[in-house]
Image (cartoon, rainbow, N blue to C red):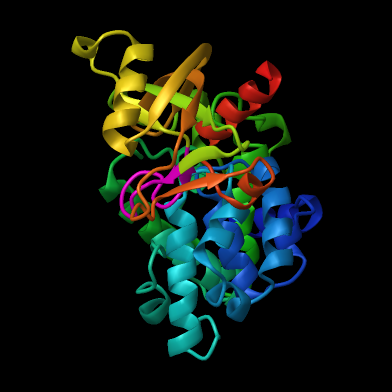
Amino acid sequence: MIDGFRNDLIDWFVQEQRDLPWRKDQDPYKVWVSEIMLQQTKVDTVIPYFNSFIEQFPNIESLANAAEDKVLKAWEGLGYYSRARNLQSAVREVHERYGGIVPDNAAEISTLKGVGPYTTGAILSIAYGVPEPAVDGNVMRVLSRVLHIREDIAKPKTRKLFEAVIRDMISQDNPSFFNQGLMELGAIVCTPTSPSCMLCPVQEHCRAFHEGVQRELPIKSKKKSAKQVSLVAGIFKNEQGQYLISRRPSEGLLANLWVFPNFIKMDELGTSKQQLESLMKTEYGLEVEMGDYLCDIRHVFTHLVWDINVYVGTFHGAPSADREDVVLVTEEEMLEYAFPVSHQNMWKEYKKFM
């Protein structure tokens, strides 16, 4: 069964693989960038980001030497910004420690920041032809069905099980196409809710299909419900046409991104509008004139949901000169700063309002 499955999978991938920009060569740097971008992000979303990113940072040296703000701006809108910071940190290590050459073995590459078992396997197999497993959600879904494995794929120990399974199955001659074939099959044929079994190149090897239970697999326990957080935010402009923005802390959620003033709502402090006016004075030492309600923005993270009431207003004076995390920018200058999606959406609503 293993030989037949392996051959059918690779033959199908050779014929049917999508034309994706990171598949045009086997440059380990480009494979690495694409795999980091593809974590928790759809392929169609990643393609323009990948092309733009590689245009700006075509190699290890250019990304290693780039300013973090420029990297975050290139990543703006992709989300999970720690991926970009970790990627640049790891690339700098490769530049300094390995002479700009991405390591070709698991022992070295797996020590790089942000490079876990999946990324290690993907880079080594795709770029270097090393028969190393690359287990992601697509792969676990495919093999859960093909081998009728009923272990909970949400549990870390299950990933170890699949890694062991793949070590026994992987093609020694073409591990690149074997791993990519599994990923591709999960992405376009063996999909989560409606697998296209009649089009599947490995249907005859699939135990779940033959037993009629393919829609029951994989087994995956539900995530905990996301924490709800209520915020109030404002887009404030002064008489000179400058907007107040601030940089988030260097650690934690959305680290080092720029945002409009925003605060967690506290019901005991009055209405959202009153709170915003008061907190602008407390936090920035600024007197503000509150304008109209602008909109509500809802943004969903993996384990967190932000519900934001947004207002517009004007401010006078300037924040303290020793506040390096606060700047005043014109609309044109704002284009140089990286904002999270929620605050990009605030700005889009503001432009409609104006």
Q: Residue at x 63, y 36 (%)?
A: 241
Quick check: 26 left or right of 206?
right
Which corner quadrant of the image does residue 308 belong to?
top left
Question: Does residue 9 sit above or below 100 in this rendering?
Answer: above
Question: Considering the image in quadrants, where does the C terminus appear?
Answer: top right
Magenta stretch: give its range: 246-259
The location of residue 15, given as percent across then percent down, is 81, 54
Q: Residue at x 52, y 45 (%)?
A: 328
Residue at far top of view = 271
Residue closest to the eye, 260 or 144: 260
Residue closest to the eye, 131 or 237: 237
* Residue 11 is inside the magenta segment: no
Residue at far left of view = 268
Question: Does residue 304 sit above or below 90 in this rendering?
Answer: above
The location of residue 81, given as percent across then percent down, is 47, 50
Is residue 204 visible in the rendered image? The answer is no
Residue at far bottom of view = 99
* Residue 248 is inside the magenta segment: yes
**Which SS type dominates the magenta stretch?**
loop
Quick check: 214 left or right of 271?
right
